[in-house]
Amino acid sequence: MRIDRILNNNVVIIKDENGEEQVVCGKGIAYKKKAGDLLSEKLINKVFVLKDTAQKQHFQEIISEIPVEYIQITTEIVEMLTQTLERKLNEAIYISLSDHIYMAITRYLDGVVVKNSMLWDIKRFYEKEYQAAKKVWKMINQTFKVELLEDEIGFITLHIVNAEMDNENLKQTMEVTKLMQEISNIVRYYFSVEFNTESVYYYRFITHLKFFAQRLLTDKEYEDDQDNELFNTIRQKYRTSYKCVEKIAEFISRKYEKELSDEEKLYLTIHIERVIYKSRD
């Protein structure tokens, strides 16, 4: 394994047998080295393989600026998350979370406080990921001897959710969460109710909202081919819930300039009816 380019003492670029570039990280891995020299494999902490050219360039720029200890703890964190959540995460989390931790601690040391306005909803929407993020938050505070605010748990949660969705665009995950928050609030205020977050119906409602928001924001809505008779039956049977859905549709049309199909309205009505009915039990 030979060095193709050196980004800094801890990060180098190599090429595999197919000529594809790989980013290799390790403390002091390039110390007193030059292009063409052999790498010591025992110093390798993490190898990243990226196919997208634009992403690769962005990745290399960021990772060359992050101290290696942040990459090391992120590697430990991702291993813990994979075991805790029992699922594979998108490898982009290694760089996005390393960068986030580095910037969070830099802000902390500079006395800059960033509040998370969606913290309460993030905790409700992504309960399992939030609990995992809380472990990460404690690891960061212990490792770097800092006291990051609990708001950071929410930001870390979004990085985890983003990686679970196999998404490399954190902005989209934040937009999905924001839309979920907006719809959830419309329902709460319309019915003057607080959800029973322990209910299976609440879990199903939130799960539906997540996929609904993803479809809406990526223009992948349900095809409007459902049974009109069923739609009319549900609309008549659950009139109050359907009126709430009409409020949601008006809001989405006004803010996002998108129209809901009857099928989207149908499933929203069913989920709202169930979650409200159970919340009032």
Image: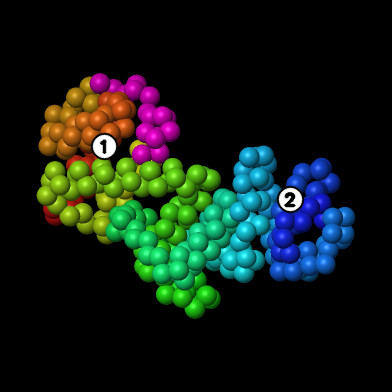
Segment colored magenta? 213-228
Looking at the rendered structure, the secondary structure element under dot 2 is strand
Left or right for 191, reference 206: left
**Within-10-Å neighbours for mark 1: few <14, some 14–19, many 20+:** many
Looking at the rendered structure, the secondary structure element under dot 1 is helix
- Name the residue nearer the viewer: 202 or 114: 114
Magenta part mainly helix, strand or loop?
A: loop
Q: Could you tell me which quadrant the N terminus lies in?
A: bottom right
Q: Identify the residue at image location x=28%, y=33%.
A: 255
- Sequence-wise first label, 2 or 1: 2
Q: Identify the residue at image location x=14%, y=54%.
A: 281
Q: Is residue 113 above or below residue 221?
A: below
Q: Is residue 224 in the magenta section?
A: yes
Q: Which residue is mark 2?
A: 22
The amino acid sitting under disc 1 is Leu
Q: Position of residue 244 (x, y in %)?
A: 17, 37
Left or right for 100, reference 222: right
Q: Which residue is mark 1?
A: 268
The residue furthest front is: 110
